[in-house]
Image (cartoon, coloured by chain):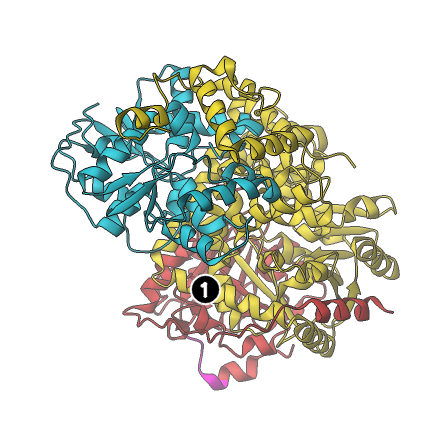
Amino acid sequence: MKVALFVPCYVDAFFPEVGVATLELLERFGCEVDFPLDQTCCGQPMANSGCQSDAHDTEALFARNFAAYEHIVTPSGSCAHHVRDQMTAIEQTAAVRAVRRNTHELVEFLHDVLGVREFPWAEFPHKVGLHIGCATLRGLREASASEIREPAFNKPARLLGAVKGLQFVQPQRADECCGFGGTFSVFEEPVSAKMGHDKVADHLEAGAEYIVSPDMSCVMHQRGCAQRAGLPLKFIHVAQVLNGARA
Amino acid sequence: MSRVDHAEASSKFIEAKDHAEFHDKRLWDLRKKRDVESEALPEWEELRSLASAIKEHTLTHLADYLEEFERNATTNGMVVHWARDAAEHNQIVFDILQAHDATTLVKSKSMLTDECEMRPFLDNRGIEIVETDLGERIQQLDDEPPSHIVVPAVHKLRGDVAEVFGRTIGTDPKNSDVPYLAESQRNHTRPYYLRAQAGMTGANFAIAETGSFVVCTNEGNADLGANLPNLHIASIGIEKLLPKVEHLGVFVRMLSRSALGSPITQITSHFRAPRPGTEMHVVLVDNGRSERLGMEDFWYSLKCIRCGACMNTCPVYRRSGGLSYGSTYSGPIGVIIDPTFNLRKYSSLPFASTLNGSCTSVCPVKINIHEQIYKWRQIIAERHQLPMVKKEAMRVAGKILSSPRMYRAAVEAAAAGIEKLPRFLVYNPFNAWGRQREVPASPPSTFRQWYLKNRGKRE
Amino acid sequence: MSSREFILQRVRRNQPAWRQLPEVPSFARPLADPLADFGTALKRMGGTLADPPGSAALDDVIRARFPTARVICSADPQVEGTRRVDAVRHPGDLADVDVGVVRAVFGVAETGSVWLSEREFGVNALGFLSQHLVVLLDPRSIVANLHDAYAHAGFREARYAVLMTGPSATADIEGVLIRGAQGIRSLTVIPVAAKSAATATTQRRTS
């Protein structure tokens, strides 16, 4: 199966290991992974600020770069959510609609499209606090949300549950937002930082050694808070754990 | 009118550590209580869908229901007035009071009267107004607006209340025992019910079928105010209409569970006609609601039943407090309706959000709050109400991120070290990032560089 | 143009496309023991369900519960009290009432609520100025949930109808729950049927 990989800018720049793990993981399952070299960004930063006209060209470039692919996978829930549900600054041609429909976040791609459940090469003997970003949770519906009365399900946990030695711990506030929120992290810094500090403290108190997440943007923010506070917490992306990272 | 600066106000709020911690924990506790209630009702999500559908139906037939309500209320002996805006509402209320020689008014909680700024209007015309809801009274005596639509003084600790009461109603300012403070307010307020010439309430729901309105409270203050003086005035927003009595089964079941995590308020009162020998006046208020009804992306906000569940769940609201929104309506619901009152003044509010969507998930009438927040951002950007810094940053980001060459240069520079961060993040907002967080470290290579080396063809 | 015309015209012009009114189900659930469910819900809301009085006179039961009460004002023919509510001229005259006594028309098991109107209060303020309220309730009148409650004709007939659920309360100061805010400090429900229909009719007040 041919798959195009979309790597968000902050992963490209600061967490390339997440992109590497994503690619290797997809290859393990027999995917032929392309990385369109002219890719940039999905347009989310501008769109989330209401700047549709500023988002236009970036979204158009995204659509062009990925038009040839039936499966577009990205290790970022917020990017996948933006593409699928909010990429409207550009004309909605059939090709654009196809690209939007075909874009998946990594976990949902593994869980729903490939349907995989086993990761025999993986072992992660640590106590893990799972953090699902809000766009991934309530936008992509990768898990049941605590506000809604519905049967419980959790795709990232389902996959991570197959990893040898991994133990989940439960924070007090299961799915309260961590406060990244894109440009919110900068333009509403006081509340953003408070939320981040509260989040990592909650996980730490629950006994987490690692915070594992499908959302590196959230991780970037939480790690920044934890490091500043000198907390003994480590952070890692779901892709890395599923791909066999031991630490 | 100057813009509300939510971020600035939130910074001050967070600095007061004890207050901020209590505020966050107390409101999260109300959210948890709401969860417990929702778990006890297997039909919870069905009730939400029903409540939403009933409201949507009503709003799409609102004119007919308003006329039906007026017809029935008038037949019952109520006097129905219509106020197109806040000023007219205040004038109508004053005229009714004047006509009855009423100079003292006891009033229960009504966000609508706060929205209309009724109190200063009546104050200036010699009407003595006593807020009877405990939280509203604390705020009135402290000359501060309410901070939460259900628990108006949630941002205060008992010591603050002791200080306010000590200063104003003669309690011992060093005694912050909560039962003592509550009892003091009870004893201080009771004589007012007995001597006031007029009582005023809001309404949670107005029923077209019977021309009646419903007031849901816990303290007993609304019913004391309604049943002692010979004049009862009720201010009702036109969006409060429901078609039939049977619909109250849905809404009364949802309201207090959503607001406080209790199955019903202690007192749920249904007013259909005045007591013999007394008068009951209803003021139906528009004040922008009919216009909002015509906004394709925002009319769903009129479904709101003022439960406050969105505030309780909002992580931003809990950590910044209602007063930091600078409006009668704060939190998520405030964010989507305040811009209709004044786009410029409230232009920062839709950005006081992470778009996490928890508000939408708790809303008993399924208002798509976070989607409306997203939409408001577009309007604010289109109408040039974004702060210059952000506008510029987004313009330049849009240029760089749509050019593969410029993007690659930016990513490589960023990866090489934050100091070399391109100016597209104008005015170095990473200064803001770095106030309370470490910045990411520089990796040995970017993903793209790794890919080209390990998997890629030559460029 | 009057404000009425202005508002109605604007509303009519702006009303979005027609949405259908849904049917409201009854969410009926059979109750094994309505009185017990009612009692549990009432207790949770801060009220008290007393034992059935058996052969004891209601006045004695009430006196035993409120031994220091000086003014017991009854709106119900089954309880004498010290003052009859029909003797009250002005609502404010009830300000010294220690215990008010009323009979509710029905109860709601879901919430522990009792239904009262101006007819049951005699004077509405009795339910709010009294320091304590005693509510007589026929256990056979308990309905399952609020959907059942809202089917009651009283909502169309009464000038003033109240679902009272426990005593008045507030948690406005630091979230500390206070029972007995500004209205009644306690609400006690005594499960007892009304006297025979004939007797009840002759004693019914006109509103």
**In which quadrant of the rendered image does the C terminus of chain C lie?**
bottom right
Chain C palette colour: red
What residue is pinned by disc 1? B49
Name the residue located 48 percent from the left edge and 39 percent from the top edge. B27
Chain corresponding to yellow in the figure: B
Chain A palette colour: cyan
Q: Which residues are magenta?
A: C193-198
Crowd class of label 1 (few under 14; some 14 to 19; many from 20; radius 10 Å): some
Q: What amino acid type should be assigned to the residue bearing mark 1?
A: Ser
Name the residue located 63 percent from the left edge and 31 percent from the top edge. B390
The chain to which mark 1 is attached is B
Most foreground residue, B415 or C93: B415
In the displayed structure, B385 sits above or below B287; it is above
Looking at the rendered structure, the number of numbered marks drawn on it comes to: 1
Q: Quadrant of residue C11?
A: bottom right
* Residue most extreme to the bottom: C198
* Residue A2 x/y as whole percent: 27, 46
**C137 horizontally vs A142: left or right:** right
**A198 horizontally vs B241: left or right:** left
Prevailing secondary structure class for the magenta stretch in the rendered image: loop
* Residue B171 x/y as whole percent: 65, 31
Most foreground residue, B411 or B427: B411
